[in-house]
Amino acid sequence: MSIANPHLKFASQAVAKPYFVFALVLFLGQILFGLIMGLQYVIGDFLFPIIPFNVARMVHTNLLIVWILFGFMGAAYYLIPEEADRELHSPKLAIILFWVFAAAGVLTILGYLLVPYAGLAKLTHNELLPTMGREFLEQPTISKMGIVVVCLGFLYNIGMTLLKGRKTTVSMVMMTGLIGLAVFFLFSFYNPGNLARDKFYWWWVVHLWVEGVWELIMGSMLAFVLIKITGVDREVVEKWLYVIIAMALITGIIGTGHHFFWIGAPEVWLWVGSIFSALEPLPFLAMVVFAFTMVKNRRRDHPNRAATLWAKGTTVTAFFGAGVWGFLHTLAPVNFYTHGSQLTAAHGHLAFYGAYAMIVMTLISYAMPKLRGLGEAADERSQQLEIWGFWLMTLSMVMITLLLTAAGAVQIYLQRWPVDGVALPFMATVDHLQVLFWARLGAGLGFFAGLICYLFSFKRRVPLTIADAAACVVRS
């Protein structure tokens, strides 16, 4: 196959570009619906009944999952051919699957927005195989089936590429993570009537994704980028990767027990869940040491400064979000009070952003200049605007996390820590959190501004000054 883009090692890597572009479009949609929810927290009837809060929340969380999956698929289509040292098995299949997945995702979101959820279940004949109604897994059964078809085609495509090409630790770890992602999603098709049993299978999708196999995907993507931008020997990077994925799998799989505290499971899970959850920050700490050590010992100064910043930033933010903020409320005696509070939301926001949104943006930052035919890095103006986007998004997410943590602490004190046997009801408690929710909305606007800067950095000619960057946000 002839190489139309001289900056790509293999022409078939170009199929990653539509996946990355569509991922960022969905990311923008996710943040817009997050801002709508932020307004609804302080102005209860905002956009009601056009977009009720439960619908906005469904769209917000589903867009999060789908755009990250698009990012993972684009990363695999870029990374696997280079690691396997051969062209992708079928670029045409990759493009077909892109349109199938994009159409299924758009139609599902439109279904949430245009049809009442009960009506959507009836319209899609959910009664034939009931799978709807669970958080993050609200998709109609037919949409879930479409996701399975896309996953099978995707795994076949990259699997055949690997079988016929070179096998490396990076590619095999990514393949293992992607297979695990597809396998654990199958539990979403089993929706038992017993609520306690339902929660077991639900967590086997959600937890074993985000605190299990997704960490393998994150580790492989981070290792790939660090090899490229630092020039450190592959053997050194692979040894680090082995240690990280071993810790991630051991702590993540057994650490699922911290979700079994209050769903009717045996008492032993209070101990098992607490102990192994306390160890879950370790693989993220190892990633921090890994990234900074590789950059310190680099053998070349890569011109893509923005990608280097994203690579280091994702490890630090993931460690605090998934590790530290997860540990804050994961021990059973503490979780008794914090379970389902705003502290959970604080952990979720920083963890998803740090571990998975940022690693996708890391690989996009590294790969997009080559995919656009610009070489190893975009021009200085573009990189400066991208770095502005990095800091605006990251600092805004830190503020969101701190504000939600404060809201959680107030909520726990007023609602769940009775003084003289008296605790405030939920709605009365929420009234005391309004100032924090307004401030959280402001931080959300800051995050949106950072995302706009990041998106504008992919233009060929972009503004350089802070005033020009602000003008980009206003024009958007």
Image: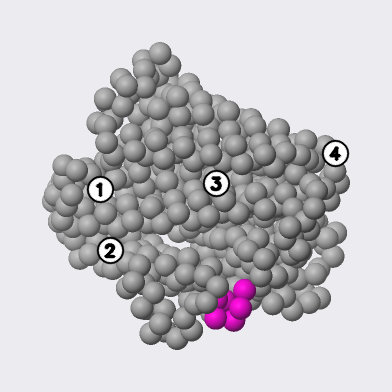
Which label is found at residue 441?
2
The numbered mark at residue 70 is 3
Residue 73 in magenta?
no
Q: Which residue is mark 4?
A: 164
Q: Is residue 53 left or right of residue 4?
A: left
Q: Which residue is mark 1?
A: 416
Q: Would you call the spot at circle 2 few (<14 residues within 10 Å), some (14-19), or many (20 or more)?
A: many
What amino acid is found at the position of numbered circle 3 in the picture?
Answer: Phe
Label 1 or label 3, whichever lies nearer to me, is 3
Relative to 474, residue 47 above or below: above
SS for callout 1: loop
Viewer can see residue 184: no
First to last magenta residue range: 378-383
Which residue occupies the foreground of this view, 214 or 428? 214
185 vs 382: above or below: above
Crowding near pointer 4: few (<14 within 10 Å), some, many (20+)?
some
Question: Which amino acid, mark 4?
Answer: Lys
